Amino acid sequence: MKTRRLGRTDLQVSELGFGAWQIGWTRPEDGDEIGRLLNRALDLGINLIDSSAAYRWSEELIAKYVGHRRDEFIFATKCGSGRVLQPDGEWVQTLDYSAKSIAPQIDRSLQRLNTDHIDIIQLHSPPFDDVVFGDGLEGLKRAQEQGKVRFVSISADEDAALKAIEIGEYDTLQITYNVLDQSPSDFLAAAREKDMGLIIKQPIANAVFAKPDKDNPSAAIADRAHSILSPEAIGDLAPVEAALRWLLNDENVHTAIVGTTNLSHLESNVEAVTKGPIPEGVAEEIGRRFQGL
């Protein structure tokens, strides 16, 4: 697994990261399969695990199964958006991006993983007004000054992402970008100019192109997937492989985080990434088809 320097940080991140959203819906006492999955990810060279206070049991499962391998992976997590387990067993989502609110979330993440630092702490999808007027960034920087976190970051899209880039004080940006949504490419270029690390979420567009049309969120998305990743465009490449290799063809991208609870999917994704960038002609055809939609 190749690595890339994550912007202005000193972190060398694997081209493929592990997104820990899906594992969060597995209870810790039922997580042996998740343990095999996480350890296999590290064994295959993935060194970035991305979680959040909002992903239910995610941080606990990471701690339980690979906490003893803490020095082998970069731990990125998020705050501002969280979930609190109620006495009746229900989870209630909380949204508060203030410095006062995120401070205990950061402490809780440190406690869950039994670690003395978080490598990358990210505001989790804050609204535009919170990015412009809120004090969440100050809260992240305060935790950084206290040695609790190494780098401050944000996970955002559209106007909120653009404003975060303009502010210029976030070390990294996590943003949606994939073959079906290539429009953020200008954002990536702007972030790269400021030497921000770029972490790509939804890099395979939730694999909508690998699902039956009835399971896709809209007919328009299904049609787009069929056009961009048609056999005429990608040849004999599998759609997920084409999507990942196309993404890593972009020199602005540092790492792509893919979540799964399926071990064979994980191994297939790693195999795809290790083949290197997609052939130039295929990349151009994918871009041409997107522009033509």
Image (tube, helix red, strand yellow):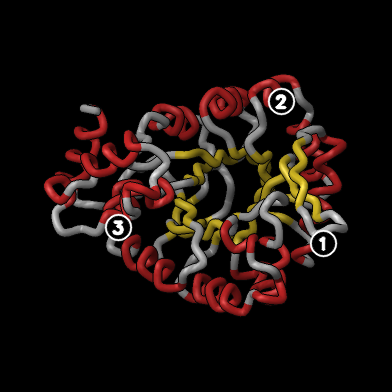
**In the displayed structure image, the side of residue 49 where residue 241 appears, left or right:** left
Task: List x then y, in percent, for residue 255.
Answer: 46, 51
**Mark 1 vs 2, N-terminal side:** 1
Q: Residue furthest front?
A: 214
Name the residue rendered at 47%, 39% in the picture.
176
Task: List x then y, in percent, for residue 119.
Answer: 67, 54
Neighbour class for label 3 at 10 Å: few (<14), some, many (≥20)? many
Residue type indicated by callout 1: Gln
Q: Nearer the viewer, mark 3 or mark 1?
A: 3
Neighbour class for label 2 at 10 Å: few (<14), some, many (≥20)? some
Name the residue rendered at 39%, 49% in the picture.
215
Give the residue at mark 1.
111
Give the residue at mark 3.
241
- Answer whether labels 1 and 2 touch (C-beta < 8 Å): no
Name the residue rendered at 40%, 62% in the picture.
2
Front residue of 231 and 49: 231
Residue type indicated by callout 2: Asp
Mark number for residue 206? none
**In the displayed structure image, the side of residue 261 where residue 277 appears, left or right:** left
Residue type indicated by callout 3: Glu
**Mark 3 vs 1, N-terminal side:** 1
Q: Quadrant of the C terminus?
A: top left
**Mark 3 vs 2, N-terminal side:** 2
**In the displayed structure image, the side of residue 19 where residue 235 appears, left or right:** left
The CA span between labels 3 and 1 is 37 Å
Q: Is residue 212 above or below residue 58?
A: above
Element under label 1? helix
Residue 153 image-quadrant placement: top right
Front residue of 50 and 116: 50
Give the residue at mark 2.
130
